[in-house]
Amino acid sequence: MINVNDKPYDWSQDMNIYKLLLLMGYKLKKPAVLITVNDNVVRRDTWDDFYIPDTAEISVINLLRGG
């Protein structure tokens, strides 16, 4: 089990950041979000290779874009 923005999600051993975003309902592979896992920022270029540990505390923060 992992917590994302204080909401529990089932964990799997092969869960990376991209799979988590799909589980959360994001449609884009790399949406405009900031992600921290256990208070450490996860760089966007490592999302595909960053496997989430069980019991992780994760924050997904939507970044505002505009012009």
Image: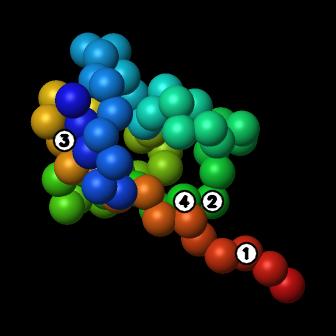
- The residue lying furthest to the bottom in this view is 67
Residue depicted at x 30% and y 40%: 8
Q: Amino acid at mark 4?
A: Val
Residue picked out by circle 3: 56
Picture coordinates of residue 55 (x, y %)? Answer: 14, 36
Residue picked out by circle 1: 65
Q: Amino acid at mark 1?
A: Arg
- The residue lying furthest to the right in this view is 67
Disc 1 to disc 3: CB gap under 8 Å: no
Local crowd size for mark 4, using a 10 Å CA cut-off: few (<14), some (14–19), many (≥20): some
Disc nearer the start of the sequence (1/2): 2
Disc nearer the start of the sequence (1/4): 4
Residue picked out by circle 4: 33
Q: Which mark is residue 55?
A: none
Residue picked out by circle 2: 32
Local crowd size for mark 2, using a 10 Å CA cut-off: few (<14), some (14–19), many (≥20): some
| Of the two numbered discs 2 and 3 in the rendering, the one whose residue sits closer to the viewer | 3
Disc 1 to disc 4: CB gap under 8 Å: no
Q: Amino acid at mark 2?
A: Ala
Picture coordinates of residue 45 (x, y %)? Answer: 49, 44
> How many marks are shown on the rendered structure?
4
Q: Amino acid at mark 3?
A: Ala
Against 17, is 62 above or below?
Answer: below
